[in-house]
Amino acid sequence: MAEDTIFGKIIRGEIPCDKVYEDDRYFAFYDINPAAPTHVLVIPKKPIPKVSDAEEADEALLGGLVLCANKVARQLGITEGGYRMVINCGKAANQEVFHLHLHLLGGRDFTWPPG
Ligand code: AMP
């Protein structure tokens, strides 16, 4: 069983957030420390700690996560300008919260390679 995290508390409404989307499988809210004019975290309600912990049975959930982020991007009006999706996994990627989340970043131009 995955450890509870601050994102688990946000999903359950125990900690406030600026919510932008919710359905039965996903939840999305603005990042508290935005790295772009639009910076939303899209998370599955299922508490998978890291993307590397995902299993075969999570295939549809992970695909749905990307489609959900696309839906949120349309909702927030960043589709035409373009956006970046980021999933940090583990130490080298500086993952801070161990509840799988997809960063949806938009509203500015991005460089490559990322820092
Ligand atoms: P990561 O480094 O990929 O684990 O990203 C964690 C993200 O969660 C960071 O961008 C934080 O700014 C963000 N974050 C942490 N606590 C909160 C919170 N209470 N509400 C919204 N975003 C948060």
Image (spheres, rainbow, N blue to C red):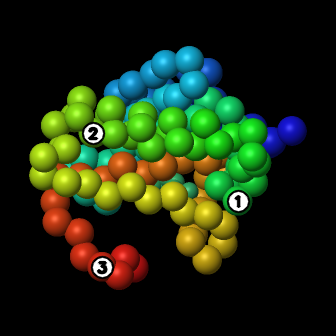
Q: Which comes sooner in the sequence, label 3 or label 2? A: 2
Task: Using the image as rendered, state which of residue 56 and residue 78 is in the foreground.
Answer: 56
- Asked whether residue 33 appears in the rendered view, the answer is no
* Residue 52, label in figure: 1
Is 53 placed above or below 61 here? below
What amino acid is found at the position of numbered circle 1 in the picture? Ser
Which circle's residue, 2 or 1, is located before the other in the chain?
1
Give the quadrant of the C terminus: bottom left
Image location of residue 37, percent across then percent down: 21, 51
**Residue 51 in the figure: left or right of residue 63:** right
Element at label 3: loop
Q: Is residue 50 visible?
A: yes
Tell me the element at label 2: helix
In this rendering, is residue 64 above or below 101?
above
Residue drawn at (16%, 60%), measured in percent from left and top?
108
Asked if labels 1 and 3 touch by Cβ distance under 8 angstroms, the answer is no
Asked which secondary structure carries label 1, the reply is helix
Query: Tag count in the figure?
Result: 3
Name the kind of residue labelled 2 in the image.
Ala
- Tell me: residue 107, above or below residue 64: below
Of marks 3 and 1, which one's residue comes earlier in the chain?
1
On the image, the x and y values in percent for residue 76 come to 22, 34
Left or right, residue 28 beside residue 113:
right
Q: Residue at x 56, y 72 (%)?
A: 93
Residue that badge 3 annotates: 112
Specify whether tag 2 is near ligand 1 (CB below 8 Å).
no
